[in-house]
Amino acid sequence: MSSYEARFKVWRGDTEGGDLEDFKVEVNDGEVVLDIIHRLQATQAPDLAVRWNCKAGKCGSCSAEINGRPRLMCMTRMSVFSREETITVTPLRAFPVIRDLVTDVGFNYQKARQVPAFVPPKELGPGEYRMMQEDVDRSQEFRKCIECFLCQDTCHVVRDHEENKQAFAGPRFLMRVAELDMHPLDAAAESGLDRKATAQDEHGLGYCNITKCCTEVCPEGIKITDNALIPLKERAVDRKYDPLVWLGSKIRRRS
Amino acid sequence: MSVVDRQEWDVVVVGAGGAGLRAAIEARERGARTAVICKSLFGKAHTVMAEGGIAAAMANVNEHDNWQVHFRDTMRGGKFLNQWRMAELHAREAPDRVWELETWGALFDRTKDGRISQRNFGGHEYPRLAHVGDRTGLELIRTLQQKIVSLQQEDFKETGDYESRLKVFQECTVTRVLKQDEKVSGVFAYDRETGRFFVLEAPAVVIATGGIGKSFKVTSNSWEYTGDGHALALLAGAPLLNMEFVQFHPTGMVWPPSVKGILVTESVRGDGGVLRNSDGKRFMFDYVPDVFKEKYAESEEEADRWYDDPENNRRPPELLPRDEVARAINSEVKAGRGSPHGGVFLDVSTRMPAEVIKRRLPSMYHQFKELADVDITAEAMEVGPTCHYVMGGIAVDSDSAAARGVPGLFAAGEVAGGMHGSNRLGGNSLSDLLVFGRRAGWHAAEYSAGLAGGRPVVEDAQIDAAAAEALRPFSAESPDEAAPENPYTLHQELQQTMNDLVGIIRREGEMAHALEKLAELRVRARRAGVEGHRQFNPGWHLALDLRNMLLVSECVARAALERTESRGGHTREDHPTMERSWRNVNLLCRLADPTGGLAATDPERGQIDLVRETTEPIRPDLLALFDKEELVKYLAEEELYE
Amino acid sequence: MATGTEPHLNSGGVHTPTRAAISASHLRTDRWWLAPAATAAGLLAFIVYSTWRAFSNADYYAAPYVSPFYSPCLAENCEPMRNGPNWEIFGSWWGLSPAILILIFPLGFRLTCYYYRKAYYRGFWASPPACAVAEPHRKYTGETRFPLILQNIHRYFFYAAVPVAGILTYDTVLTFRDENYEWGHMGLGTLVFLVNIVLIWAYTVSCHSCRHIVGGKLKHFSKHPVRYRMWQWVGKLNARHMLLAWASLVSVALADFYVYLLASGVFDDPRLF
């Protein structure tokens, strides 16, 4: 078992301002960045604010930016860095900061509320649902999401353009729309809700330019872009930009 | 004293894990304006860590399954100490609770004919666990979270405000349940983000805060598991039941040190993984206790046949209840047959093709790859016992989940005691959350509505006292001028104490020593001081949580010292056998000083009084579900003849 | 936060006043610029080469090989290719290079392709240059407005790309003739064409729109087992869409360049049999 002293720069501050602070801290074999932050707390900076919970990559609480890249601190092993490297840890930079490494992620909870919930089919009671595995596979992939909001943080649509936060739900919640639209028993259509069209009209799917950063940062390895966003774009095309479909619906409406 | 923000609600739920959210949904659907308070962000609760599944006798995979079999398994697993009425309600209602989740959008893995698939698990006679890969807890929490959002969407349509009837106060901590006379009047809490205090006035409070694992060094539990609910109930005058029963999950990661304790799901064994010692021997065959002899295979060949033909073969001993497996691993390591990092080997790599492992155990594959650099499809995992769950908890009424002796206080989930007896079966916790979460929410709403005009009032003096208590760490100083204590150091010492002295194998002298050490820590904890200010200050938060951990740890140590037998999650080296005379004895912990002042610094007396209580006899029709020969092993003579 | 005023360049995005005060616009320490730079260089090289070849209107036929840039050849000014893909739909009024008539389709297909969009948004537009690296634009509306909203017509280019790939397949079949149009021969060029057509098809079929059309649009795979099978198959290819996009881009340029070398007489096609 070997240990060494690493150099860290950790952003400390709050809404009033702040700066990167230098630390020297012991690192042991097998540790992750979150262990080091905890060591700082216990030995050098007891009031260093950080969010964490499960420490096993399952709850998605300890999101931060390490050397400029959005990551979970508990899943970033120290062994990926060289011993000479100075490791910079900052809070997520797409959301308002609260203190130190903690940001206000309320944006995501707001957006979650704007996606209409699963609509249960009227004719089926509890226990009567029958779904085939191949029909639930796609939505199950999206339900692996641990809501760490790294995709929301890295997405340049809102990261670089605060003003787009109104109109754009972000990859996590567009993926939620896709999940529900692919749910084999979702009865939204029967209740008059067209998830394909609202993805474009209300959740800002058009803002996505499929540059795939959401997929790159996803700690669960969900293929957000290829399996959720692009299929959703194609579904929106079915509704809004396909002249054949458009013509068909015109004719149907007339008759 | 500063003016503290007050809000009025009908029901307040403390904790937003499975039980808390299910309670909140139920209370809101029954018309109560409901507030949920949780320490983390909404949706991050420890429930997400549950991997294996939800036990419910839906009989989707084996048609012979029914609630009676489930009840039987639960009682056996708990060594007949379970509050039998809870075990009955749980077994009867679990399927409805699972099916209900589907109507809220949950997507479980499916059988060939499109129903919810169910998997094998330790102690369950039939495949019974509804699951989603190995991330069932996440599915549960997300489904409940999304159901809450959908209720909020309904409220928004009606009232224009998402939070008019159901609000989640996230990243807030409750430090006191407030009472007027005997009755609950609300809770005192602080907002972690700003440090501001606030009071939620409500006649009904549901405690659903989970467990106590953070008092132990090696644990699968997250930082939130500081026994807050246990302590809140104690301080409010409610008793805790059978706190000596702490489940050590047999398979936690043992390396690297920073992840020591993190859970390796039981599904690894349910799906075919086997335990081996350093000699390569499947040692579990040597550890099948007499009470289980007829149910478990005697040879590797028979055990291996069971996966494909469970009708004609007995199950592998790797699937014994958790307490048995944890003790067996402990013995192997002690005998010098452990793995390099002090565990044993858990192997799936030689049992299944790599693709199957990746498909059925994706997050385990991921966890070992990312955290330990181990490819579980190619090599064995190293595992060892880790503190996982507390069977003991707030003593509640089985049907209503009402805490004993404090009108308006309810408890559900891990924080409530009784349901699991002396040992919980895997998969029974998620179903417990749903069944009793719903019941707690239901009865809390009913109780609250029944009080209509005459609600208890929150008194200013109580608020002032609670605020002063919460602020103490900022002005910590000691009479003898000693420096303030570092809360992180105190916490580490507490964890070490509990791990070493009240851990998986217990001895009288060590526990007595633990009580002394706890008393010392209690004195030092009064001097725990913090730097900085109230805004998101983890040092301060920990200093406040220490009170709860110390209280709960004392309960565990005292009860463990008292129970002179080994049963389920309580193993005494000096009393290694299960005694039938202890079968019907419950141990209740109460606060020694019922005024709630924490003046008791005397190590002899401590803060906790222990009371023995005889349990209610098991209802005859439920007893009739077991063979006489089996009952003889558990029940005392006089119980058998009644 | 939408205040109605245009945020100043230094105060927008990651420098919005509510966010953590960090002066650097990004803190990445790796060579994040490498991928967009390489992408831009690769695309630029192809654009330069293909523009030159498309407008040159020469050296695109060396029996039995026709450059994929000029196939099918739809104007009267095409070089005669026996049994080859020249159909004079456009007659004699067309005076420019006939390549332009047909290249619109593959060009449109690739221009609206979900992979190439990512590539040029990142490589040329720096929107974003790399993940968590601030983009230099003041405003961003993505694909919500004209002209980028036209990206939604990708599937029509896919429909057009299929017959084009069909004709290139026909061309490849014709390469089993020799320079005198006798069947049963094979040259090095035949191999080049074979590799190219396989990659062209793989790229075309792995398209996201194709994945949607064959099965992705369905709600219940279990009710359409054949389409489900096709969707899975396309999905496997689709996972390599980026690789196929580059491989087919290179192979089509190489096939054209090979024809150019033959037609301009640099060397003769080595015969295999």
Image (cartoon, coloured by chain):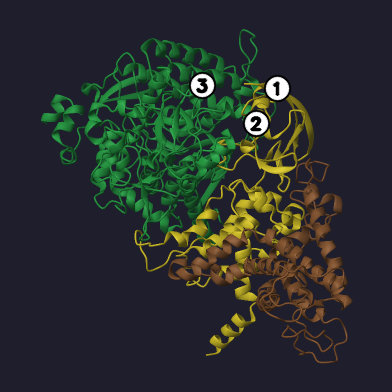
Chain colours: A yellow, B green, C brown
Find residue B161 and report its horizontal and vertical position in percent: 57, 57
Q: Residue furthest bottom?
A: C92
Q: Are marks 1 and 3 in one subunit?
A: no
Q: How crowded is mark 1: few (under 14 residues within 10 Å), some or many (20 or more)?
A: few
Find residue C57 and report its horizontal and vertical position in percent: 87, 78
Residue at left offset 35%, top offset 61%: B113
Check disc 1 and report the residue beneath it.
Answer: A4
Q: Which chain carries label 3?
A: B
Q: In which quarter of the image is residue B271?
A: top left
Check disc 3 and report the residue beneath it.
Answer: B495
Q: Which chain carries label 2?
A: B
Q: For the residue labelled by badge 1, is the local secondary structure a helix, a strand or a loop?
A: strand
Look at label 1 and name its amino acid.
Tyr
Residue at left offset 67%, top offset 45%: A104
Look at label 3 and name its amino acid.
Gln
Q: Are marks 3 and 2 in one subunit?
A: yes
- The answer to whether residue C154 shows anywhere in this view is yes
Q: Which of C44 and A103 is in front in this view?
A: C44
Q: Residue furthest top?
A: B480
Q: Kindly report which numbered mark, 3 or 2, lies closer to the viewer in this rendering.
A: 3
Q: How crowded is mark 3: few (under 14 residues within 10 Å), some or many (20 or more)?
A: many
Q: How far apart are marks 3 and 2 (CA)?
A: 21 Å
Q: Which of C68 and B258 is in front in this view?
A: C68
How many numbered dots are placed on residues in this image? 3
Q: Nearer the viewer, residue C197 or B305?
A: C197
Q: For the residue labelled by badge 2, is the local secondary structure a helix, a strand or a loop?
A: loop
Look at label 2 and name its amino acid.
Asn
* Rendered image: mark on residue B537: 2
Q: Eyeballing the image, is C228 above or below A8?
A: below
Q: Quadrant of residue C93?
A: bottom right
Find residue C95 and report its horizontal and vertical position in percent: 88, 86
Find residue A250 and report its horizontal and vertical position in percent: 59, 85
